[in-house]
Image: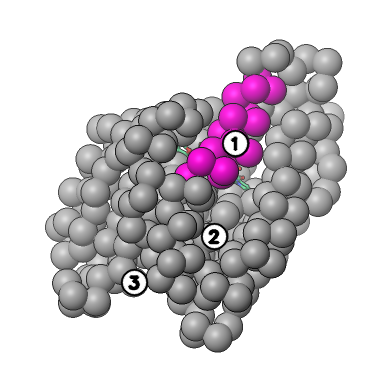
Amino acid sequence: MKADRSEAARRVALVTGASRGIGRAVCLRLARDGYEIVAVARSEMDLNALAVEIDLAGGRCRVYPLDLTDAARIDDELGGMHADVVVNNAGIGVTKPFLELTPADWNRMIALNVNALYHVTRAVLPGMMDRGAGHVCTIGSISGRSAFVGGSCYAATKAFVTAWAESLLLETRERGVKVSVVSPGGVATMFGGKVPTAADAWKLKAEDVADAVSYVVGTPPSVLVHRVEVRTLSAPPPKRG
Ligand SMILES: NC(=O)c1ccc[n+]([C@@H]2O[C@H](COP(=O)([O-])OP(=O)(O)OC[C@H]3O[C@@H](n4cnc5c(N)ncnc54)[C@H](OP(=O)(O)O)[C@@H]3O)[C@@H](O)[C@H]2O)c1
């Protein structure tokens, strides 16, 4: 990996959920595209390892170990930060039948998948609007528009993403700020606390989603790709039993 932008031209991409999975892959990809990365997640060790990898490849990465369910800390640490791109990626999925979801499950998903979008985007959007340029790119999910058992909260948080992003776009487009949603199908990551196995081989790789994000944020100034769905060509194997 070799960064291909000079220091002077380096733009800043703030990526949440950067410690692993899709967010980590997005950081590596955007660093390769020449962005200085602002990497946010809770796991400081994993963020530091990411920063070393980006540094060794000639890029730049600043780390912000932060629990994004803590609105006050987001405001303190990220408020007013210069970002040319923000990738709202951090998200969790507790997928259980509705009556088995605890109040804590419900509130954690809403706090991260919904409320953190408000706080993180508010931290950087005023600067984008003032400069007349910027891009708010959020990771949705195909589950935001196709129901599944156990998805009553998670799928609803992803449906929120598309409705929020489309409305936000109407407020920002005349000020030069793009808003996009990248919605993957199944991706082989540790999402939901599961370690990927051979049975996940049919899924997308995190890098496939990162490539889509790179494309979306790399379009010419006059072009907006507002929504992208990324799927594997193959269907999931049939469930046994
Ligand atoms: N995997 C899939 O099949 C799939 C499909 C469609 C959409 N998505 C979406 O893709 C996004 C990324 O998922 P992934 O598959 O990469 O999952 P993942 O491997 O579990 O990564 C989730 C990331 O979010 C961070 N995070 C979790 N809780 C956080 C908190 N309270 N504060 C700050 N950061 C937090 C994690 O870092 P720390 O634990 O270090 O905080 C980690 O970096 C999510 O929005 C998910 O809904 C995933």
Amino acid of disc 3: Asp
Q: Residue 230's x, y, as percent?
A: 64, 63
Amino acid residing under circle 2: Cys
Kind of residue at badge 1: Asn
Start and end of the magenta stretch? 105-120
Q: Earlier in the sequence, mark 1 or mark 2?
A: 1
Q: Residues within 10 Å of mark 3 (few under 14, many from 20)?
A: some
Quadrant housing residue 10 = bottom left
Label disc, if present, on residue 137 of the rendered structure: 2
Residue furthest front in the image: 130
Magenta stretch, main secondary structure class: helix
Q: State how far apart marks 1 and 2 are (Cα).
A: 16 Å
* Residue wearing tag 3: 33
State whether residue 39 appears in this view: yes
Residue name at image x 17 percent, y 56 percent: 55
Mark 2 residue element: strand
| Circle 3 or circle 2, nearest the eye | 2
How dense is the environment of label 1, judged by Cα within 10 Å: few (below 14), some, or many (20 and up)? some
- Residue at image position (55%, 86%) is 222
* Rendering quarter of residue 228: bottom right
Q: Mark 3: which secondary structure?
A: loop
The reply to whether the residue tagged 1 has its Cβ within 8 angstroms of ligand 1 is no
